[in-house]
Image (spheres, grey):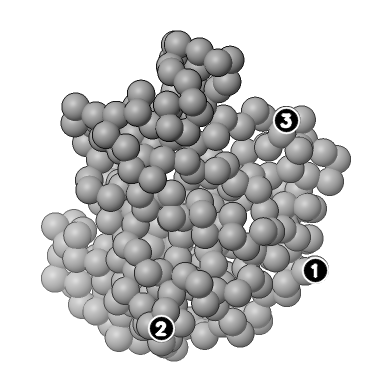
Amino acid sequence: MEFSSINAAVSALFGSEVESSERLYGGDINNAFALRLKNGGLAFMKSNRSAPPGFFKAEIEGLSAIAKTETIGTPRALGYGSENGRAFLILEYVSEGRRTKSFWETFGRRLAAMHAADTSPYVHSGRFGFDLGNYIGRTRQINSPKDTWIDFFRECRLEPQFKAAERFFGASDIKRINSLLDDLGNYLTEPRRPSLLHGDLWSGNFMTGPDGEAWLIDPAVYVGHAEADIAMTELFGGFDSRFYAAYREAAPLEPGYPDRRDLYNLYQLLNHLNIFGGSYLGSVMRIVKRYA
């Protein structure tokens, strides 16, 4: 639901007004606040003065898609809007709990269940993509539906990122990149089934919920190959080994996954190159040269 002001949102959603706000820390792109309400309740708010159109609406759609699978926890997104040029998103306030002893095993099984959920509600004119464009970090993410995973990953993931980063590449680099894109079908495989993906699943994008289990936050959802989510979990240090053992027990990975992992993470590294600059160029080109 869209609102014209923060107070209007809080009044409609909670029947109260904001008494005070406390700045929270941890996000790279948005500011985060705990809103204390006059009726004693709490709400969580993100805000951003430079958010592009539809930025927080897309996050609501992503959180709602995850919630609809009824497989893994995620905060309820309640409303969004803009006030004096400041975009905002209101979510339920979720208190962090103490991790259960089986936290990682449960996380692995629940993510596997999400990946096995019906994807038909999320993409209607193809098998892969999402019915709404969204964002990965602050980068626009194209989700145009495609009938094959390889076409989707080439046209909606790698090609836009390479185009945005073309200033970093010389003529020989571009030749290798074009070869990689042309031959992508030699390296990637079509999944057994399409899966709803979190899309940006690293250690900063899950939390311990009040039930002591993993809850997903800050999604960049789309329907794709489950391997892409697993690859992202391994990019910046990886998760606990118990997570991977439980996931593989519930949903065994297809043969050859280790040979495809770097290609999935090429998308993430290209996005970092485009957002944060040339320090990621070496990592990008090492992957390109491995395959082309």
* Image-based side of 34 in relation to 69, left or right: left
The residue lying at 21 percent from left, 58 percent from top is 165
- Determine whether the residue tagged by mark 1 lies in a helix, strand or loop: helix
Which residue is at the front of the view, 212 or 258?
Answer: 212
Image mark for residue 249: 1
- Work out whether mark 1 precedes mark 3 in sequence or the reverse, and give the earlier one: 3
Disc 2: which residue: 126
Please tell me how crowded label 3 is: few (under 14), some (14-19), or many (20+) other residues with Cα within 10 Å.
Answer: some
Local crowd size for mark 1, using a 10 Å CA cut-off: few (<14), some (14–19), many (≥20): few
Q: Which residue is mark 3?
A: 97
Residue at the image position 68 percent from the left and 44 percent from the top: 214
Pointer 1 with pointer 3, Cβ within 8 A = no
Mark 2: amino acid: Gly
Please say if 132 is above or below 62.
below
Counting from the top left corner in percent of width and height, residue 84 is at: 19, 27
Q: Are marks 1 and 2 in contact (CB under 8 Å)?
A: no
Q: Is residue 291 visible?
A: no
Q: In front: mark 1 or mark 3?
A: 3
Quadrant of the rendered structure where residue 75 is? top right
